[in-house]
Image (spheres, rainbow, N blue to C red):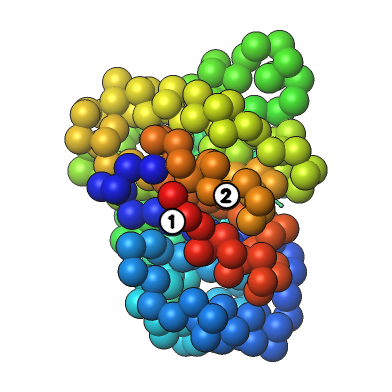
Amino acid sequence: MNPDRRPLIAANWKMHKTLAEAVSFVESIQKQTGPLGDREVLIAPPFTSLKEVGDTLKEGGYSLGAQNCHWEQKGAFTGEISTVMLKEMGCAYVLVGHSERRQLFGETDETVRLKTAAVIAAGMVPVVCVGEVLGERERGETFDVVGRQVEEAFTGLSAEQMAGVVIAYEPVWAIGTGKTATAGQAQEVHGYIRARISSLFNKTIENNVRILYGGSVKPSNIDVLMAEPDIDGALVGGASLEVASFTSLIEFNV
Ligand code: PEP
Protein backbone atom coordinates (compact mmCIF):
# COMPACT_ATOMS: atom_id res chain seq x y z
CA MET A 1 0.00 0.00 0.00
CA ASN A 2 1.28 3.43 -0.91
CA PRO A 3 0.26 6.18 1.56
CA ASP A 4 -0.22 8.63 -1.33
CA ARG A 5 -3.15 6.56 -2.60
CA ARG A 6 -6.16 6.45 -0.28
CA PRO A 7 -7.03 2.80 0.34
CA LEU A 8 -10.43 1.82 -1.01
CA ILE A 9 -12.44 -1.13 0.27
CA ALA A 10 -15.34 -1.78 -2.11
CA ALA A 11 -18.39 -3.98 -1.51
CA ASN A 12 -19.95 -5.56 -4.58
CA TRP A 13 -23.21 -7.00 -3.33
CA LYS A 14 -24.16 -8.44 -6.73
CA MET A 15 -27.82 -9.62 -6.67
CA HIS A 16 -28.06 -9.77 -2.87
CA LYS A 17 -30.03 -7.88 -0.23
CA THR A 18 -33.52 -6.47 -0.27
CA LEU A 19 -33.99 -2.76 0.34
CA ALA A 20 -34.60 -3.26 4.07
CA GLU A 21 -31.54 -5.53 4.41
CA ALA A 22 -29.36 -3.07 2.51
CA VAL A 23 -30.32 -0.09 4.66
CA SER A 24 -29.95 -2.02 7.88
CA PHE A 25 -26.49 -3.24 6.78
CA VAL A 26 -25.14 0.25 6.08
CA GLU A 27 -26.61 1.58 9.32
CA SER A 28 -24.84 -1.19 11.27
CA ILE A 29 -21.54 -0.84 9.48
CA GLN A 30 -21.36 2.91 10.07
CA LYS A 31 -22.29 2.48 13.73
CA GLN A 32 -19.46 -0.03 14.13
CA THR A 33 -16.74 1.80 12.21
CA GLY A 34 -17.57 5.53 12.55
CA PRO A 35 -15.57 8.02 10.45
CA LEU A 36 -13.02 6.25 8.31
CA GLY A 37 -9.95 8.46 8.57
CA ASP A 38 -7.31 7.46 6.03
CA ARG A 39 -9.50 4.98 4.13
CA GLU A 40 -12.53 5.01 1.86
CA VAL A 41 -15.39 2.52 1.63
CA LEU A 42 -17.53 2.01 -1.44
CA ILE A 43 -20.86 0.24 -1.30
CA ALA A 44 -22.28 -1.05 -4.61
CA PRO A 45 -25.77 -2.41 -3.86
CA PRO A 46 -28.30 -3.56 -6.46
CA PHE A 47 -29.90 -0.70 -8.44
CA THR A 48 -33.10 -1.04 -6.40
CA SER A 49 -31.38 0.06 -3.18
CA LEU A 50 -29.13 2.81 -4.51
CA LYS A 51 -31.20 5.79 -3.43
CA GLU A 52 -31.90 4.62 0.10
CA VAL A 53 -28.40 3.28 0.70
CA GLY A 54 -27.00 6.61 -0.52
CA ASP A 55 -29.32 8.50 1.82
CA THR A 56 -28.19 6.29 4.72
CA LEU A 57 -24.45 6.74 4.06
CA LYS A 58 -23.75 9.72 6.30
CA GLU A 59 -20.30 9.05 7.76
CA GLY A 60 -17.31 10.62 6.03
CA GLY A 61 -15.38 8.37 3.68
CA TYR A 62 -18.33 6.26 2.52
CA SER A 63 -19.28 6.38 -1.16
CA LEU A 64 -22.07 4.89 -3.26
CA GLY A 65 -21.50 2.94 -6.45
CA ALA A 66 -23.48 1.02 -9.07
CA GLN A 67 -22.57 -2.41 -10.40
CA ASN A 68 -23.14 -1.70 -14.08
CA CYS A 69 -24.47 0.91 -16.51
CA HIS A 70 -25.26 1.46 -20.17
CA TRP A 71 -22.98 3.67 -22.25
CA GLU A 72 -25.76 5.72 -23.87
CA GLN A 73 -27.35 8.53 -21.89
CA LYS A 74 -30.89 7.55 -22.88
CA GLY A 75 -32.79 5.62 -25.55
CA ALA A 76 -34.64 2.44 -26.44
CA PHE A 77 -32.57 0.03 -24.30
CA THR A 78 -35.14 -1.91 -22.31
CA GLY A 79 -33.91 -2.88 -18.87
CA GLU A 80 -30.80 -0.71 -18.95
CA ILE A 81 -29.74 2.15 -16.65
CA SER A 82 -27.75 5.17 -17.84
CA THR A 83 -24.88 6.98 -16.15
CA VAL A 84 -27.05 10.11 -15.90
CA MET A 85 -29.59 8.13 -13.86
CA LEU A 86 -26.88 6.71 -11.62
CA LYS A 87 -25.37 10.11 -11.00
CA GLU A 88 -28.84 11.37 -10.07
CA MET A 89 -29.07 8.56 -7.47
CA GLY A 90 -25.90 9.88 -5.84
CA CYS A 91 -23.41 7.38 -7.26
CA ALA A 92 -19.77 8.42 -7.24
CA TYR A 93 -18.48 5.13 -8.73
CA VAL A 94 -19.64 2.52 -11.25
CA LEU A 95 -18.18 -0.99 -11.58
CA VAL A 96 -17.38 -1.72 -15.22
CA GLY A 97 -16.45 -5.02 -16.83
CA HIS A 98 -16.88 -7.29 -13.81
CA SER A 99 -16.05 -10.85 -14.87
CA GLU A 100 -19.65 -11.92 -14.26
CA ARG A 101 -20.77 -9.26 -16.75
CA ARG A 102 -18.09 -10.43 -19.20
CA GLN A 103 -18.82 -14.14 -18.80
CA LEU A 104 -22.59 -14.23 -18.27
CA PHE A 105 -23.87 -11.12 -20.03
CA GLY A 106 -21.68 -10.70 -23.09
CA GLU A 107 -19.58 -7.76 -21.90
CA THR A 108 -16.65 -7.25 -24.27
CA ASP A 109 -13.52 -5.11 -24.21
CA GLU A 110 -15.38 -2.75 -26.55
CA THR A 111 -18.43 -2.34 -24.28
CA VAL A 112 -16.08 -1.94 -21.31
CA ARG A 113 -14.37 0.89 -23.17
CA LEU A 114 -17.69 2.57 -24.02
CA LYS A 115 -18.97 2.27 -20.45
CA THR A 116 -15.71 3.51 -18.96
CA ALA A 117 -15.84 6.63 -21.14
CA ALA A 118 -19.54 7.17 -20.33
CA VAL A 119 -18.94 6.96 -16.57
CA ILE A 120 -16.11 9.49 -16.76
CA ALA A 121 -18.18 11.80 -18.98
CA ALA A 122 -20.96 11.73 -16.38
CA GLY A 123 -18.53 12.86 -13.68
CA MET A 124 -18.23 9.54 -11.85
CA VAL A 125 -15.32 7.17 -11.35
CA PRO A 126 -15.26 3.83 -13.16
CA VAL A 127 -13.87 0.83 -11.29
CA VAL A 128 -12.67 -1.14 -14.30
CA CYS A 129 -12.36 -4.86 -13.63
CA VAL A 130 -9.78 -6.99 -15.41
CA GLY A 131 -8.50 -10.49 -14.85
CA GLU A 132 -7.59 -13.79 -16.43
CA VAL A 133 -9.46 -17.10 -16.27
CA LEU A 134 -7.76 -20.20 -14.90
CA GLY A 135 -6.79 -21.64 -18.29
CA GLU A 136 -5.15 -18.37 -19.29
CA ARG A 137 -3.11 -18.33 -16.07
CA GLU A 138 -2.09 -21.96 -16.56
CA ARG A 139 -0.99 -21.25 -20.12
CA GLY A 140 1.13 -18.30 -18.93
CA GLU A 141 -1.12 -15.74 -20.63
CA THR A 142 -2.01 -13.61 -17.60
CA PHE A 143 0.00 -10.54 -18.57
CA ASP A 144 -1.19 -10.68 -22.20
CA VAL A 145 -4.84 -10.93 -21.21
CA VAL A 146 -4.73 -8.31 -18.47
CA GLY A 147 -2.57 -6.00 -20.59
CA ARG A 148 -5.05 -6.23 -23.46
CA GLN A 149 -8.03 -5.58 -21.18
CA VAL A 150 -6.33 -2.54 -19.66
CA GLU A 151 -5.28 -1.13 -23.00
CA GLU A 152 -8.69 -1.59 -24.61
CA ALA A 153 -10.61 -0.16 -21.64
CA PHE A 154 -8.66 3.08 -21.67
CA THR A 155 -8.08 3.62 -25.38
CA GLY A 156 -9.02 7.14 -26.37
CA LEU A 157 -8.93 8.64 -22.88
CA SER A 158 -6.76 11.66 -22.17
CA ALA A 159 -4.43 11.69 -19.16
CA GLU A 160 -6.82 14.19 -17.60
CA GLN A 161 -9.79 11.83 -18.04
CA MET A 162 -7.73 8.94 -16.69
CA ALA A 163 -6.89 10.76 -13.45
CA GLY A 164 -8.88 9.23 -10.61
CA VAL A 165 -9.89 6.06 -12.50
CA VAL A 166 -9.78 2.90 -10.36
CA ILE A 167 -8.73 -0.50 -11.71
CA ALA A 168 -9.64 -3.79 -10.03
CA TYR A 169 -7.49 -6.82 -10.75
CA GLU A 170 -9.72 -9.83 -10.21
CA PRO A 171 -8.33 -13.18 -11.33
CA VAL A 172 -11.53 -14.93 -12.39
CA TRP A 173 -10.38 -18.25 -10.86
CA ALA A 174 -10.32 -16.55 -7.44
CA ILE A 175 -13.79 -14.97 -7.53
CA GLY A 176 -16.26 -16.66 -5.21
CA THR A 177 -14.15 -19.81 -5.17
CA GLY A 178 -12.37 -19.38 -1.84
CA LYS A 179 -9.06 -19.49 -3.77
CA THR A 180 -7.16 -16.24 -3.28
CA ALA A 181 -4.18 -15.26 -5.34
CA THR A 182 -1.20 -15.12 -3.03
CA ALA A 183 -0.11 -11.62 -2.13
CA GLY A 184 2.93 -12.22 -4.36
CA GLN A 185 0.82 -13.31 -7.35
CA ALA A 186 -1.46 -10.29 -6.94
CA GLN A 187 1.43 -7.84 -6.50
CA GLU A 188 3.11 -9.17 -9.64
CA VAL A 189 0.05 -8.38 -11.76
CA HIS A 190 -0.64 -5.06 -10.01
CA GLY A 191 2.93 -3.99 -10.73
CA TYR A 192 2.48 -5.01 -14.36
CA ILE A 193 -0.77 -3.03 -14.67
CA ARG A 194 0.84 0.04 -13.13
CA ALA A 195 3.74 -0.15 -15.58
CA ARG A 196 1.28 -0.56 -18.45
CA ILE A 197 -0.60 2.54 -17.31
CA SER A 198 2.67 4.44 -17.31
CA SER A 199 3.35 3.52 -20.93
CA LEU A 200 -0.23 4.38 -21.97
CA PHE A 201 -0.33 7.70 -20.07
CA ASN A 202 2.43 9.08 -17.87
CA LYS A 203 4.29 8.70 -14.56
CA THR A 204 1.82 10.84 -12.61
CA ILE A 205 -1.12 8.66 -13.63
CA GLU A 206 0.96 5.55 -12.92
CA ASN A 207 1.68 6.77 -9.40
CA ASN A 208 -1.85 7.96 -8.67
CA VAL A 209 -4.04 5.21 -10.14
CA ARG A 210 -5.56 3.00 -7.44
CA ILE A 211 -5.49 -0.71 -8.21
CA LEU A 212 -7.74 -2.92 -6.10
CA TYR A 213 -7.39 -6.66 -5.71
CA GLY A 214 -10.53 -8.83 -5.85
CA GLY A 215 -11.03 -12.56 -5.47
CA SER A 216 -12.00 -14.21 -2.18
CA VAL A 217 -10.70 -11.36 -0.04
CA LYS A 218 -11.57 -12.06 3.59
CA PRO A 219 -10.52 -10.92 7.07
CA SER A 220 -7.78 -13.57 7.18
CA ASN A 221 -5.97 -12.36 4.04
CA ILE A 222 -6.68 -8.62 3.77
CA ASP A 223 -3.67 -7.51 5.83
CA VAL A 224 -1.13 -9.44 3.80
CA LEU A 225 -2.64 -8.21 0.53
CA MET A 226 -2.74 -4.58 1.68
CA ALA A 227 0.91 -4.78 2.73
CA GLU A 228 1.93 -5.05 -0.95
CA PRO A 229 3.16 -1.78 -2.48
CA ASP A 230 0.87 -1.81 -5.52
CA ILE A 231 -2.33 -3.05 -3.85
CA ASP A 232 -4.45 -0.05 -2.93
CA GLY A 233 -7.61 -1.73 -1.74
CA ALA A 234 -10.00 -4.58 -2.31
CA LEU A 235 -13.13 -5.31 -4.31
CA VAL A 236 -15.09 -7.76 -2.21
CA GLY A 237 -18.05 -9.98 -3.01
CA GLY A 238 -18.88 -12.70 -0.48
CA ALA A 239 -17.19 -11.17 2.57
CA SER A 240 -18.95 -7.83 1.99
CA LEU A 241 -22.36 -9.35 2.71
CA GLU A 242 -21.91 -9.85 6.48
CA VAL A 243 -21.45 -6.92 8.84
CA ALA A 244 -18.80 -8.69 10.92
CA SER A 245 -16.57 -9.72 8.03
CA PHE A 246 -16.93 -6.44 6.15
CA THR A 247 -16.15 -4.45 9.30
CA SER A 248 -12.93 -6.46 9.75
CA LEU A 249 -11.98 -5.74 6.15
CA ILE A 250 -12.52 -2.01 6.63
CA GLU A 251 -10.37 -2.19 9.75
CA PHE A 252 -7.44 -3.88 8.01
CA ASN A 253 -3.98 -3.24 9.47
CA VAL A 254 -0.84 -2.46 7.58
C1 PEP B 1 -16.22 -10.04 -6.87
O1 PEP B 1 -17.25 -10.52 -7.29
O2 PEP B 1 -15.82 -8.94 -7.32
C2 PEP B 1 -15.47 -10.79 -5.89
C3 PEP B 1 -14.22 -10.49 -5.73
O3 PEP B 1 -16.14 -11.80 -5.22
P1 PEP B 1 -15.56 -12.67 -4.01
O4 PEP B 1 -15.00 -11.68 -3.00
O5 PEP B 1 -16.77 -13.38 -3.45
O6 PEP B 1 -14.54 -13.57 -4.55
Decide if residue 234 is in sight here.
Answer: yes
State the image coordinates of residue 154 (x, y, percent, origin top left).
Answer: 39, 35
State the image coordinates of residue 56 (x, y, percent, origin top left).
Answer: 50, 87
The residue under the point 25% across, 47% down is 4
State the image coordinates of residue 11 (x, y, percent, origin top left).
Answer: 58, 62
Q: Which residue is mark 1?
A: 8
Point out the residue furthest to the top here: 139
The residue under the point 30% across, 37% down is 157
Q: Nearer the viewer, mark 1 or mark 2?
A: 2
Q: Of residues 232 and 149, which is closer to you in this image? A: 232
Quadrant position of the N terminus in the picture: top left
Q: Amino acid at mark 2?
A: Ile
C-alpha span from label 1 to label 2: 12 Å
N-terminal-most mark, 1 or 2: 1
Q: Amino acid at mark 1?
A: Leu
Q: Which residue is mark 2?
A: 222
Decide if residue 114 is in sight here.
Answer: no
Q: Please say if 46 is above or below 203.
A: below
